[in-house]
Image (spheres, grey):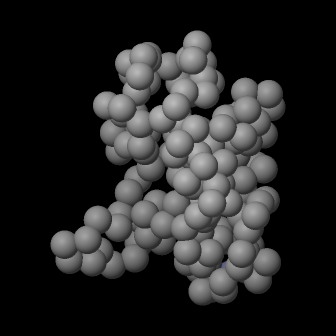
Amino acid sequence: MDKKDLVAPCGMYCGICDKYLAYSHKLPKKRGKVCYCKGCRPQNKNCSFIKKKCETGKIYEIDFCFECNIFPCGILKKGSIKYKDRYHYDFVEKLSQIKNNGTDWFIKEQENLFKCSKCGDTICVHNQKCYSCNKEEIIG
Ligand SMILES: [Zn+2]
Protein backbone atom coordinates (compact mmCIF):
# COMPACT_ATOMS: atom_id res chain seq x y z
CA MET A 1 0.00 0.00 0.00
CA ASP A 2 1.10 3.54 -0.74
CA LYS A 3 1.79 5.26 2.56
CA LYS A 4 0.26 8.42 1.14
CA ASP A 5 -3.11 6.69 1.42
CA LEU A 6 -2.60 6.76 5.17
CA VAL A 7 -2.71 10.54 5.33
CA ALA A 8 -6.39 11.46 5.67
CA PRO A 9 -7.90 14.67 4.23
CA CYS A 10 -8.21 16.12 7.77
CA GLY A 11 -4.48 15.72 8.50
CA MET A 12 -4.80 12.53 10.51
CA TYR A 13 -1.99 10.06 9.93
CA CYS A 14 -3.84 6.73 9.94
CA GLY A 15 -0.58 4.85 10.55
CA ILE A 16 -0.71 5.84 14.24
CA CYS A 17 -4.43 5.14 14.77
CA ASP A 18 -5.44 2.32 17.14
CA LYS A 19 -7.82 0.85 14.57
CA TYR A 20 -5.21 0.87 11.83
CA LEU A 21 -2.53 -0.60 14.10
CA ALA A 22 -4.94 -3.38 15.13
CA TYR A 23 -5.45 -4.07 11.43
CA SER A 24 -1.80 -3.89 10.38
CA HIS A 25 -0.66 -6.01 13.34
CA LYS A 26 -3.47 -8.49 12.71
CA LEU A 27 -4.90 -8.28 16.21
CA PRO A 28 -7.89 -10.57 16.64
CA LYS A 29 -11.21 -8.78 15.97
CA LYS A 30 -13.28 -8.20 19.06
CA ARG A 31 -16.86 -9.28 18.67
CA GLY A 32 -19.31 -6.41 18.24
CA LYS A 33 -16.52 -3.86 18.40
CA VAL A 34 -15.18 -1.94 15.46
CA CYS A 35 -11.50 -1.95 16.12
CA TYR A 36 -10.11 -2.70 12.71
CA CYS A 37 -9.50 -0.20 9.91
CA LYS A 38 -7.37 -0.04 6.77
CA GLY A 39 -7.18 3.74 7.04
CA CYS A 40 -9.65 6.51 6.24
CA ARG A 41 -8.84 6.77 2.54
CA PRO A 42 -8.64 3.03 1.78
CA GLN A 43 -11.76 2.43 3.88
CA ASN A 44 -14.14 5.17 2.71
CA LYS A 45 -12.13 6.68 -0.12
CA ASN A 46 -12.83 9.77 1.91
CA CYS A 47 -13.12 11.05 5.42
CA SER A 48 -14.85 9.46 8.39
CA PHE A 49 -14.41 12.49 10.61
CA ILE A 50 -15.84 15.39 8.60
CA LYS A 51 -17.73 13.74 5.75
CA LYS A 52 -21.37 14.89 5.85
CA LYS A 53 -20.58 17.74 8.22
CA CYS A 54 -18.36 19.41 5.62
CA GLU A 55 -19.68 22.95 5.23
CA THR A 56 -18.69 23.44 1.60
CA GLY A 57 -19.16 19.86 0.41
CA LYS A 58 -15.64 20.13 -1.00
CA ILE A 59 -14.46 17.14 1.02
CA TYR A 60 -15.47 15.06 -2.00
CA GLU A 61 -13.37 17.10 -4.43
CA ILE A 62 -10.20 17.89 -2.55
CA ASP A 63 -7.26 15.85 -1.35
CA PHE A 64 -6.72 17.77 1.89
CA CYS A 65 -8.82 20.21 3.87
CA PHE A 66 -6.22 22.98 3.46
CA GLU A 67 -7.22 23.18 -0.23
CA CYS A 68 -10.61 24.52 0.81
CA ASN A 69 -11.25 28.26 0.66
CA ILE A 70 -12.62 28.35 4.21
CA PHE A 71 -9.76 26.33 5.75
CA PRO A 72 -9.70 25.92 8.67
CA CYS A 73 -13.48 25.68 8.95
CA GLY A 74 -15.42 25.50 12.23
CA ILE A 75 -15.88 21.73 12.13
CA LEU A 76 -12.18 21.12 11.61
CA LYS A 77 -11.17 23.60 14.30
CA LYS A 78 -13.59 22.09 16.80
CA GLY A 79 -12.35 18.56 16.14
CA SER A 80 -8.78 19.75 16.21
CA ILE A 81 -9.10 21.28 19.67
CA LYS A 82 -10.71 18.12 21.01
CA TYR A 83 -8.00 15.93 19.54
CA LYS A 84 -5.23 18.20 20.69
CA ASP A 85 -6.54 18.11 24.26
CA ARG A 86 -7.01 14.39 24.29
CA TYR A 87 -4.23 13.05 22.08
CA HIS A 88 -1.84 15.99 21.55
CA TYR A 89 -2.54 15.81 17.83
CA ASP A 90 -3.60 19.06 16.15
CA PHE A 91 -5.24 18.63 12.73
CA VAL A 92 -4.93 22.27 11.73
CA GLU A 93 -1.23 22.29 12.61
CA LYS A 94 -0.64 18.96 10.86
CA LEU A 95 -2.44 20.16 7.73
CA SER A 96 -0.25 23.27 7.64
CA GLN A 97 2.80 21.03 7.83
CA ILE A 98 1.54 18.94 4.90
CA LYS A 99 0.80 22.10 2.93
CA ASN A 100 4.25 23.56 3.59
CA ASN A 101 6.46 20.48 3.44
CA GLY A 102 4.60 17.90 1.39
CA THR A 103 3.14 14.48 2.17
CA ASP A 104 6.41 12.51 1.97
CA TRP A 105 8.08 14.76 4.54
CA PHE A 106 4.99 14.61 6.73
CA ILE A 107 4.89 10.79 6.76
CA LYS A 108 8.57 10.57 7.73
CA GLU A 109 8.00 13.18 10.43
CA GLN A 110 5.09 11.24 11.96
CA GLU A 111 7.05 7.98 11.76
CA ASN A 112 9.89 9.59 13.70
CA LEU A 113 7.59 11.28 16.17
CA PHE A 114 5.65 8.12 16.96
CA LYS A 115 8.58 5.71 16.85
CA CYS A 116 8.80 3.25 19.73
CA SER A 117 12.08 3.84 21.58
CA LYS A 118 12.34 0.17 22.43
CA CYS A 119 11.69 -1.66 19.17
CA GLY A 120 11.37 1.04 16.49
CA ASP A 121 7.77 0.22 15.58
CA THR A 122 4.89 2.66 16.03
CA ILE A 123 3.43 4.16 19.18
CA CYS A 124 -0.33 4.58 18.89
CA VAL A 125 -1.64 8.14 19.17
CA HIS A 126 -4.82 6.94 20.88
CA ASN A 127 -3.48 4.69 23.62
CA GLN A 128 0.29 5.43 23.66
CA LYS A 129 1.03 1.76 23.16
CA CYS A 130 3.41 -0.06 20.85
CA TYR A 131 1.57 -2.93 19.17
CA SER A 132 4.81 -4.85 18.62
CA CYS A 133 6.52 -4.81 22.02
CA ASN A 134 3.74 -3.39 24.28
CA LYS A 135 5.90 -0.50 25.47
CA GLU A 136 3.87 2.52 26.57
CA GLU A 137 5.13 5.98 25.71
CA ILE A 138 3.63 9.45 25.83
CA ILE A 139 4.09 11.37 22.59
CA GLY A 140 3.61 15.11 22.22
ZN1 LIG B 1 7.90 -1.24 20.49
Q: Position of residue 123 (x, y in %)?
A: 65, 71
Q: Nearer the viewer, residue 10 or 13?
A: 10
Q: Position of residue 91 (x, y in %)?
A: 62, 43
Tell whether 71 sits left or right of 28: right
Pinpoint residue 122: horizontal percent, then vertical percent.
65, 68
Tell me what residue is drawn at x 41 percent, y 22 percent.
Answer: 55
Quadrant containing ligand 1 reads bottom right
Q: Which residue sits furthest left?
A: 32
Classify residue 3 by image quadrant.
Answer: top right
Q: From what the image shows, is residue 26 above or below residue 40?
A: below
User: Relative to 15, is 135 on the left or the right?
Assistant: right
Vertical relation: 96 (above or below) 7 = above
Please, which residue is most extreme toward the top here?
A: 69
* Residue visible at 52% across and 31% down in the picture: 74
Q: Nearer the viewer, residue 12 or 93?
A: 93
Q: Quadrant of residue 77?
A: top right
Q: Does 136 appear above or below 5?
A: below
Residue under the image location 64 percent in, 55 percent down: 84
Image quarter hosting the C terminus: bottom right
Q: Nearer the viewer, residue 85 or 49?
A: 85
Report whether residue 101 is seen: yes
Instruction: Tell how many labels.
Output: 0
Q: Position of residue 119 (x, y in %)?
A: 73, 80
Q: In terms of depth relative to the viewer, which is nearer, 118 or 86?
A: 86
- Whether residue 110 is situated above or below residue 47 in the rendered picture: below
The quadrant in which residue 48 appears is top left
Residue 42 in view in this figure: no
Q: Is residue 96 left or right of residue 6?
A: right
